[in-house]
Amino acid sequence: MSSADKNLSVFNTNGLPDISKKRFAILVAEWNSEVTERLFEGAYKTLVDYGATPENIERGNVPGSFELTLGSQWFAQRPDIDAVIALGVVIQGETKHNDYINHAVAQGITNVSLKLDKPVIFGVLTPNTMQQALDRAGGVHGNKGDEAAMTAIKMIGLHENIL
Ligand code: DLZ
């Protein structure tokens, strides 16, 4: 039996919200900038394509993905920001740092999102190689920056539906 048959209210992300007055922050890690710049371009274009105005999109750079957490918190605590998109690339195997960084950023961004009660999107690639990263930043596997932006848009819509 479908939800409609049960006459349930379903809070989903099928209908995208009007984001023309929503304000976004995109945080970009400078490590692996040849990839993170492409993620940024994808995220920015998706926001604009779906109705955000350029003046309502702010960009912040952080040195590395580890700093995405605190940078996200600084943006997310601003009342005028509706969603934060955090973009980074941590290549596995280049360093033993990678696991620490990935887990710290994933947990940190989750904490920020819950603490500030707004979408903070985890747009961090964790590939094994640079080629895999490029493939996911406008290459054969699409652009995860686009997906991160779309996730932000959907979460704004979901928030409007539920609360
Ligand atoms: C130190 C470091 C290393 C080894 N690798 C990466 C990486 O692959 N991607 C990334 O975004 N950042 C890396 N960093 C930098 C850390 O994120 C952070 O900037 C430093 O540890 C300083 O806190």
Image (cartoon, rainbow, N blue to C red):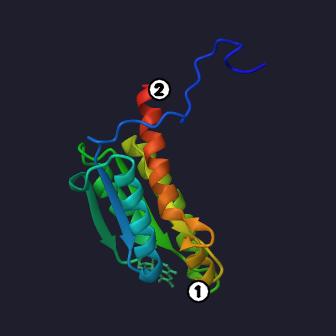
In the picture of the structure, the residue carrying the numbered disc 1 is 95
Which residue carries the number 2 mark? 162
Q: Position of residue 120 (x, y in %)?
A: 43, 51
Residue occupying the point 50% across, 49% down:
151
Quadrant (top left/top right/bottom left/bottom right) for the N terminus: top right
Q: Position of residue 47 (x, y in %)?
A: 38, 53
Q: Residue furthest left?
A: 55
Viewer-proximal residue, 18 or 114?
Answer: 18
Asked whether residue 34 is in view, the answer is: yes
Query: Which x, y percent locates residue 142?
Result: 57, 66
User: From the Cβ of disc 1, is ligand 1 less than 8 Å away?
Assistant: yes
The residue nearer to you, when weighing 65 against 51, is: 51
Rounded to the nearest angstrom, the CA distance separating label 2 from label 1 is 42 Å
Q: Quadrant of the C terminus?
A: top left
- Residue that appears at 34% across and 41% down: 19
Circle 1 packing at 10 Å, graded few (<14), some (14-19), many (20+), is few
